[in-house]
Image: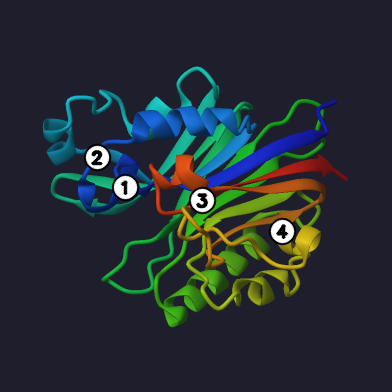
Amino acid sequence: MQRTLRIATFNIHKGVTSFNARLVVHEQRELIRRLQADIVFLQEVRGAYLHHQRRFSGWPSESQQEFLAESNWADFAYGKNAVYPAGHHGNAILSKYPIVQTDNVDISAHSAEQRGMLHCQIRIPGWDQDLHCICVHMGLFARWRRSQLFALREHINGLIPPQAPLIIAGDFNDWRVKAGQVLADGLELREVFEHTNGKSARSFPSVLPLFRLDRIYVRGFNVHQVEVHGGTAFSRVSDHAALSAHLTRL
């Protein structure tokens, strides 16, 4: 029975550097592969964008989620959130195990920001219950994030069995580190870095992380190892560091 999982989360900044200066999705794919994660939570994934397809000669012919998954992850899901005339972007989950159900829920708190949460059920061999994974990218303003966090909590309470294993990961934009209070209240979730190190991880900016924006919350797991993947390699391709965790099913 497969009891251990390595998971990672990474905001890929639409596969380009700041100000759209350079295409970096090829470098990102190599860095994500090195994380050796069974399940990867990705934010700001570009499903399509005509302008960049024309501008960059190396722009993948397939969607970014498909390009990043390639042969390393057997299954993937994409949640289209922000839609504009030339394309769209959102969240994605890459999985080495079958994704048996997918739901992308609109949690936009204001017309100025289109946000969603991607909920996937993943079938792990030998497990008595499917693993529930939710990938999120929360809003920039505190009142919007609070509304989105309550929507996330209601979604979990309404649709996910209390004993089912659950992982929530992504970019919470939570400068004030308030998300944990909302999620832990009645959901029995714990943030893996807070559990291991006493504080959530510094993940932004990736070159020298100062702010604790990205999180991994789990239920039904022991946490064995956590790591922040930043520094030069990651700062070349995104303003966010990647986070990973090694988990064992209870």
**Residue 98: x, y in percent?**
61, 27
Helix, strand or loop under label 4: helix
Query: Residue 22: which disc?
Result: 2
- Residue type beneath disc 4: Phe
**Viewer-nearest of labels 2 and 4?**
2
| Secondary structure of the residue carrying numbered label 3 | loop
Which mark lies nearer to you, 4 or 3?
3
Label 2 residue SS:
loop
Task: Identify the mark nearer the N-term, 4 or 3.
Answer: 4
Residue in the image at 70% along x and 37% along y: 6
Camera-side residue of 8 and 94: 8
Tag 1, which secondary structure? Answer: strand
Q: Looking at the picture, tell me which residue is in the foreground, 229 or 42.
A: 229
Q: Is residue 46 visible from the viewing direction of this image? A: no
Residue to which mark 4 is pinned = 193
In this rendering, the label closer to the viewer, 1 or 3: 3
Where does the N terminus fall, quadrant-wise?
Answer: top right
Say which residue label 3 marks.
Answer: 241
- Residue 89 - label: 1
Q: Quadrant of residue 26?
A: top left
Say if 125 sits above or below 249 in the image: above
Residue at the image position 24 percent from the left and 28 percent from the top: 59
Crowding around mark 1 (Cα neighbors within 10 Å: few <14, some 14 to 19, many 20+) is many
Q: CA distance from mark 2 to mark 4?
A: 32 Å
Identity, as a three-letter code, of the amino acid under mark 3: Ala
Q: Are marks 1 and 3 in contact (CB under 8 Å)?
A: no
Going by the numbered disc 1, the residue's amino acid type is His
The residues bearing labels 3 and 2 have C-alpha atoms spaced at a distance of 18 Å
